Image (cartoon, rainbow, N blue to C red):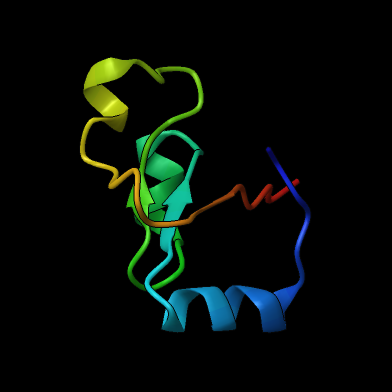
Amino acid sequence: MPTSIFRDEVYRLIRQGARLVEVLPRPEYEWAHLPGAVNLPLKKPDADTVSGLDADRPVIVYCHDFQ
């Protein structure tokens, strides 16, 4: 279930092994993303794009909108 979290919680979850997922298109991801984040564009989620995520690790999904 999606839950909004703040920066301190993000840091804590990452230290515990959570995976960061940036959902913007690839060009925006390449321009600016958080260290260690993987890119899974929101418009293309399917079994192939999410297959690399470990179901036993928390996933932090974020999107940095520059507008």
Is 21 in front, or is 9? 9
The image position of residue 52, as x and y in percent, is: 21, 40
Residue at 68%, 47% (x, y): give it. Answer: 65
- The number of numbered discs placed on residues in the rendered structure image is 0
Displayed quadrant of residue 45: top left
Residue at 35%, 38% (x, y): give it. Answer: 26
Residue 41's place in the image compared with 15, above or below, is above
Displayed quadrant of residue 48: top left
Residue 14's place in the image compared with 59, above or below, is below
Is 54 in front, or is 44? 54
The image position of residue 4, as x and y in percent, is: 78, 54
Residue at 50%, 39% (x, y): give it. Answer: 23
44 displayed left or right of 42: left
The image position of residue 29, as x and y in percent, is: 41, 49
19 displayed left or right of 63: left
Residue at 68%, 38% (x, y): give it. Answer: 1
The image position of residue 28, as x and y in percent, is: 46, 45
Residue lying furthest front? 56
